[in-house]
Image (cartoon, rainbow, N blue to C red):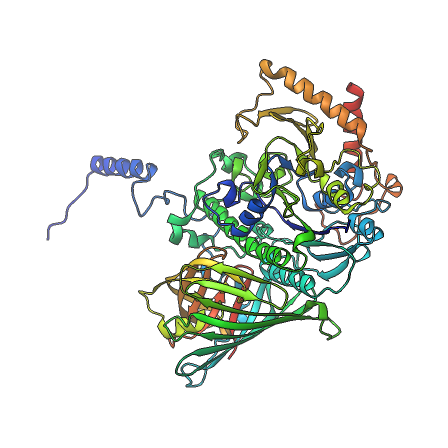
């Protein structure tokens, strides 16, 4: 059988609810809606870690962040780990990349033919990225199957309009479009002036609503670009033999819990859309609410469809292909998401509950009945068994992964690079804490 | 006229009433907006020029020397980005240019557009020829669009070449290439972003309330756009001068609020979005 082409379209910082097909009334995403209609959505989909580089490194290596070494954006990928580009190239694929890559420590050009590098701003670069992808799909002459990864930046532009440097956002304009501003989320924390993230404490509630309004417009901007690529795939010569994968590296606060940005383990940051379609091969319009899936599974899924062997040592990653083909197979009963931003934390999510473990405390939420995570049940004796069970899951997870202690040279004192920002952690600063914490958790078992 | 005196008791009473009204937010001139106004933009320059505030001191408004409505508009594309001086700084730089030429005949109007933007180290070149109806908006009828990338070595990347043609009839948009085609449905008159400066030059008015669909880059449909007058703003420009410009605001699906700033001859001198703006050169 001829190997399929694979088009992997990913966006940056997309809240899992910011899609009109999923019921959001404040945004119009006709292109993503079409992909959802044409394919199968995983509704219980999470990133491996809610920050750009770590999440992307998980997509492309099939390893968790504490395995591949990209524990925050500035940390490099373990050099010995192969990535999907290198792997599929060995399997006879033409591997092609356009747009945002952002896997620190790995030169994308060594793994893919690069069409366009995009820009740090979606408003500037996303159209050029889409055009490069469409041009490639129309102009390519090779006979080998291709793996095209398309990295759009938006709605990540939301990070800058209200930056501490003043940003380009027109927040004063909000008063002119009051009737168009979306409401604050139901779990908005009105005490944010005192307890919120530092960068948003001086925002007014109108600023918040304008932020959310702008965010939805950025989603619509990238939606149009996604539609352009999707049209070129589905209406072009590769239509019948191309698997289309759509997801996001992580979410955005979007005002939920009065948060912006990412890096933490609440649903708004670590839950992401994930849709796959392939006419006649993958059920159209299906929403899988049963299976917990992770961004770390992307590599396993793509290898499976490409007929390639799994990437080495994929400890927790699993292919979604059997699920997409409607096969009844044993599936994981919990999923893990971890972070090193703002301190260490790691969450275990099962079908109903989510526990977030920190080195000094634990929080528990009933996601099924309290999807907005408004009531912490960790101190509730009736739920002590849930936390206990999740702690056992956590230890099992830690026993399965290959905890990366950092590169050998970092065990020696590494000089701080002269140009590094003063507040940026020194390379090596973040390895030891999680290694020690994870060892302690394992020992407790 | 007999002066009225306020004794100490009356003064304290009225002061107390005013204080309680202020506390309750019921003295409109003193109370904060019910939704808090803007904490981010408080006291800053007009938000319409916020994305290009560092460019403005170098901007000299274009004067066409008596030519009221030039047939060709030349804009610089100005990018907002972070400054090199570290955290808390920002800067504007010119990353491209747009030329928009418009010719009219009895049965149609033709826009010729040449746009070049440097993104990711390469020049992204786009050329469009758009035939439009002769209605007030110059709604689009058919077009040809070509684009390609030019690398740092000056060579065109053959893999980047795109050629498309399209047409719009009764809201049905069809875009074709030699390899594929796609369709979109519009619910209003359709124009491109290159049409709007000319549209405002022809019809800007403080009572303006336009609704249209935008086909950005003759490719991406952005429905339900609204264009309205947004007030007169004072804009600091080159030489320490301040220019009074009329601003028009466009809002709608798939775009961030976009301002068009017109001089007294209704020339669109500046167009600001968020990260990208246009500045009229000649």
Q: Is residue A210 above or below residue B64?
A: above
Report x, y in % for residue B250. 43, 61
Report x, y in % for residue A82. 83, 46
Q: Is residue A392 above or below residue A212?
A: above
> Could you tell me if residue A273 is visible in this image?
no
Residue furthest toward the top? A381
Total number of numbered discs in the rendering? 0
Residue furthest toward the left? B1
Q: Residue at x 39, y 43 (%)?
A: B35
Q: Quadrant of residue B33?
A: top left
Q: Quadrant of residue A444?
A: top right
Report x, y in % for residue B181. 57, 63
Q: Residue at x 49, y 70 (%)?
A: B194
> Could you tell me if residue A266 is visible in this image?
yes
Front in this rendered view, residue A383 or B144: B144
Q: Quadrant of residue A113?
A: bottom right
Front in this rendered view, residue B104 or A166: B104
Q: Residue at x 51, y 44 (%)?
A: A21
- The quarter of the picture where the C terminus of chain A appears is top right
Q: Is residue A14 above or below residue A238?
A: above
């Amino acid at each position: 059988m001829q190997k399929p082409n694979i088009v992997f379209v990913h966006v940056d910082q997309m809240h899992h609810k910011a899609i009109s097909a999923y019921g959001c009334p404040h945004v119009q995403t006709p292109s993503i809606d079409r992909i959802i209609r044409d394919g199968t959505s995983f509704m219980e989909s999470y990133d491996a870690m809610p920050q750009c580089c770590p999440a992307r490194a998980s997509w492309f290596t099939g390893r968790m962040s504490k395995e591949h070494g990209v524990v925050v954006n500035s940390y490099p990928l373990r050099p010995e780990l192969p990535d999907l580009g290198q792997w599929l190239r060995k399997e006879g694929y033409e591997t092609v990349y356009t747009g945002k890559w952002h896997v620190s420590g790995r030169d994308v050009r060594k793994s893919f033919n690069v069409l366009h590098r995009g820009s740090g701003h979606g408003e500037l670069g996303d159209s050029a990225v889409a055009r490069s992808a469409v041009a490639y799909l129309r102009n390519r002459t090779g006979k080998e199957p291709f793996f095209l990864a398309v990295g759009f930046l938006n709605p990540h532009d939301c990070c800058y309009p209200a930056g501490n440097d003043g940003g380009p956002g027109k927040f004063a304009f909000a008063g002119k479009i009051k009737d168009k501003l979306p409401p604050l989320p139901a779990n908005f924390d009105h005490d944010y002036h005192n307890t919120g993230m530092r960068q948003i404490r001086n925002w007014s509630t109108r600023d918040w609503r304008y932020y959310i309004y702008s965010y939805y417009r950025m989603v619509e901007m990238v939606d149009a670009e996604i539609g352009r690529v999707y049209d070129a795939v589905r209406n072009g010569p590769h239509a019948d033999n191309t698997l289309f994968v759509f997801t996001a590296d992580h979410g955005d606060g979007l005002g939920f819990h009065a948060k912006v940005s990412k890096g933490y383990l609440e649903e708004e940051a670590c839950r992401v859309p994930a849709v796959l379609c392939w006419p006649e091969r993958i059920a159209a319009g299906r929403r899988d609410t049963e299976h917990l899936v992770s961004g770390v599974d992307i590599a396993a899924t793509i290898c499976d469809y490409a007929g390639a062997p799994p990437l080495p040592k994929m400890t927790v990653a699993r292919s979604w292909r059997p699920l997409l083909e409607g096969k009844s197979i044993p599936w994981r009963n919990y999923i893990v998401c971890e972070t090193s931003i703002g301190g260490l934390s790691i969450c275990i999510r099962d079908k109903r509950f989510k526990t977030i473990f920190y080195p000094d405390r634990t929080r528990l939420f009933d996601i099924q009945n309290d999807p907005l995570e408004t009531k912490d049940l960790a101190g509730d004796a009736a739920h002590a068994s849930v936390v206990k069970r999740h702690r056992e899951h956590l230890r099992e997870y830690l026993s399965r992964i290959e905890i990366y202690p950092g590169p050998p040279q970092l065990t020696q004192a590494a000089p701080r690079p002269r140009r590094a920002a003063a507040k940026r952690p020194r390379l090596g600063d973040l390895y030891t804490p999680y290694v020690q914490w994870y060892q302690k958790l394992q020992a407790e078992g | 006229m007999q002066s009225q005196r306020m004794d100490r008791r009356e003064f304290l009473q009225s002061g107390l009433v005013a204080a309680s009204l202020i506390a309750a937010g019921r003295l409109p001139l003193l109370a904060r907006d019910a939704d808090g106004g803007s904490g981010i933009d408080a006291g800053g320059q007009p938000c319409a020029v916020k994305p290009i505030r560092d460019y403005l001191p170098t901007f000299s408004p274009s004067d066409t020397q008596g030519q009221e409505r030039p047939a060709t508009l030349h804009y610089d594309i100005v990018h907002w980005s972070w400054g090199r001086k570290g955290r808390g700084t920002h800067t504007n730089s010119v990353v491209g240019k747009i030329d928009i030429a418009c010719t009219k005949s009895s049965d149609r109007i033709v826009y010729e557009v040449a746009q070049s933007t440097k993104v990711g180290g390469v020049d992204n070149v786009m050329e469009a020829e758009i035939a439009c109806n002769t209605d007030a908006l110059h709604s689009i009828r058919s077009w040809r669009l070509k684009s390609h990338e030019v690398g740092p070595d000056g060579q065109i990347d053959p893999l980047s070449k795109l050629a498309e043609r399209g047409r719009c009839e009764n809201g049905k948009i069809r875009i074709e290439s030699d390899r594929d085609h796609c369709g979109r449905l519009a619910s209003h008159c359709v124009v491109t972003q290159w049409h709007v400066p000319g549209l405002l030059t022809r019809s800007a008015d403080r009572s303006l309330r336009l609704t249209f669909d935008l086909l950005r880059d003759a490719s991406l449909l952005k429905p339900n756009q609204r264009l309205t007058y947004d007030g007169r703003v004072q804009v600091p420009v080159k030489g320490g001068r301040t220019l009074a410009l009329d601003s028009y605001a466009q809002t709608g699906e798939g775009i961030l609020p976009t301002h068009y700033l017109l001089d007294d001859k209704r020339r669109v001198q500046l167009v600001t979005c968020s990260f990208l703006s246009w500045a009229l050169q000649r």
